[in-house]
Image (spheres, grey):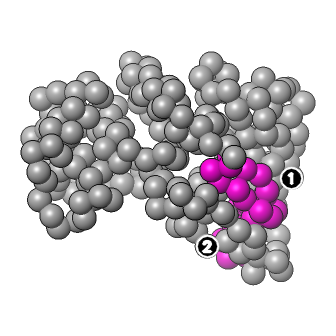
Amino acid sequence: MNAIAISDLTVAYDGHPAVHHFSGSFERGSLTAIVGPNGAGKSSLLAAVMGRLRPAAGQVRIAEDLRGRIAWLPQQAEIERSFPISVFDLIALGHWGRSGAFRGLDHGQREAVMEALDSVGLNGFERRSIGELSAGQFQRVLFARLLLQDAPVILLDEPFNAIDARTTADLLALVHRWHAESRTIVAVLHDLEQVRAHFDRTLLLARRCVAWGPTTEALQPENLAKARQMAEAWDDHAPPCREAA
């Protein structure tokens, strides 16, 4: 059974498609990497699934029992690090879906925040401002917030970009834990060796789907070459697509 089904999806900016006529589905409990050249539409696809980008055409269908139960980790560059909030309070935002934005935390919820901190190796960091953290520490905090969200579907946009190897290994262990719990996980990644080692399914995207299936098959050299050729053929100065306008 599918968690997310996508039908003939086009996502565009000013009439120029970032994702073009894309169809496919993510099965429940699957662990999928999305890879492709720069500008391939990987982040745009996730944003469309989250409802943050309105499709120019086509649709995204979320299984009825999963609607409103998707956790999303954006790229770090999209998050304002100068906002004056503590590590504890940022992680506690993971409770909002169940407790609301303006209700205080009960004892159990506070304990859950501390347990999440411990799970990502940041015990004792709860009072620090997020502006004091390194990139790796901040990414651990964001993963701790995901732990509190306890969502059956988790979307990760470049979760291991510009962080150290130790942090990457620890966070990958969390990803495997979620997969073992039968959660549906989709991650935009760049490191193909990392994908081969840790993700059993891969979507190779170049605005259109190039390959999608078992990682060893999707990342065959001929598929990677085709994705590069498609990227090199893009013309960002072409007239807007009429379907996407």
Would you name the residue on which mark 2 appears? 54
Residue 46, given in percent of the width and then of the height, sits at 59, 54
> To which quarter of the image does residue 125 belong?
top left
* Left or right of 139, for residue 183: right
Task: Give me the residue at 72% from left, 59% from top.
Answer: 6
For badge 1, the amino acid type reads Ala
Task: Based on the picture, tell me whether residue 11 belongs to the magenta stretch.
Answer: yes
Q: Are marks 2 and 1 in contact (CB under 8 Å)?
A: no
Which range is magenta?
2-26
| Residue 26 appears in view | yes
Residue 237, given in percent of the width and then of the height, sits at 78, 68
Q: Which mark is first along the chain, 1 or 2?
A: 2
Using the image as rendered, state which of residue 201 and residue 229 is in the foreground: 201
Q: From mark 2 to mark 1, how far is it between C-alphas? A: 26 Å
Residue 73, given in percent of the width and then of the height, sits at 44, 48
* Left or right of 147, for residue 176: right
Quadrant of the frame with the C terminus: bottom right
Task: Give me the residue at 82% from left, 77% from top.
Answer: 243
Task: Give me the residue at 11% from left, 59% from top.
Answer: 104
Would you name the residue on which mark 1 appears? 233
For badge 2, the amino acid type reads Arg
Q: Total number of numbered labels?
A: 2
Residue 172, given in percent of the width and then of the height, sits at 47, 25
2 or 1: mark nearer the eye: 2
Using the image as rendered, state which of residue 134 and residue 58 is in the foreground: 58
